[in-house]
Amino acid sequence: MALKPYKTFMQRSEDEFIVNKSRFIGYGCPVETEEEALKFLNEIRTKHKDATHNCYAYIIGSNMGIMRYSDDGEPGGTAGLPIIEVLKARGVTNCCVVVTRYFGGILLGAGGLVRAYSQGAAAAVNACGVGVIHPTARYIMEIPYPSLGKVEYFLKSQPVIVEDKAFSDAIVMTLIVKNEDEDKFVKDIVSATDGKIEPIRMEEMYLAWKE
């Protein structure tokens, strides 16, 4: 059965802000398993072992089958739950968010904490960027130098990403395309180049494409 496309983070990233002198840092990372999520969490905890709290949430599985969160010492329901609610609202899975807090001396109250940790999670998600995982194919094709301009112009209108160009006797181009688009792409480029260029399928994988 084909994998149903699902949303996750495009990359690992972070962002931070200050609320009433407390410093909040939102970290996000794409993960494939619960073990990877816990490894990321432990990395952030080690990096910020002097922080007041390292609260987290993660969701694993294309069907969002695993959901875990922790307040890490903050009042119950004010940290981990707001973080996971942001992830659920954005519809992302296979991802982990850790929001680190350095207490600034001013109590925020339950409502203030919920808002701050929600903001921390949203900052992490926005920094990471959200993409949709699709079955994707990698192709390689050899392009004669006189045809390069025509091929590059053609590719601008195609749903492909050019990964690499290597220059030798001819140009060897590596590109990726969603499985759902590949048949039409191959047919169109063969037609556009009068059969001179025929992409060769190298491998299949799962890749996040920008939302």
Image (tube, grey):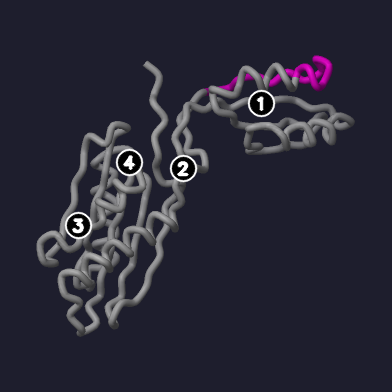
**Mark 3 Cα-neighbour bin, 10 Å: few <14, some 14–19, many ≥20:** many
Magenta segment boundaries in residue numbering: 190-203
Of the pair 205 and 78, the residue shown nearer to us: 78
35 sits to left or right of 74? right
Q: Which of the two marks, 3 or 1, is nearer to us in this view?
A: 3
Q: CA distance from mark 1 to mark 4?
A: 31 Å
Q: Amino acid at mark 2?
A: Gly
Could you tell me residue 131's position as x and y percent?
46, 42
Mark 1 vs 4: CB contact within 8 A: no
Above or below, comparing residue 197 to residue 76 in the picture: above
Q: Name the residue: 40% across, 19% down.
A: 2
Q: Amino acid at mark 1?
A: Ile
Residue named by callout 3: 80
Q: Which of the two marks, 1 or 2, is nearer to us in this view?
A: 2
Q: Name the residue: 24% across, 42% down.
A: 35
Could you tell me residue 98's position as x and y percent?
28, 58
Residue named by callout 4: 93
Q: From this viewpoint, which residue is outermost toward the right?
A: 146
**Dot label at residue 140:** 1
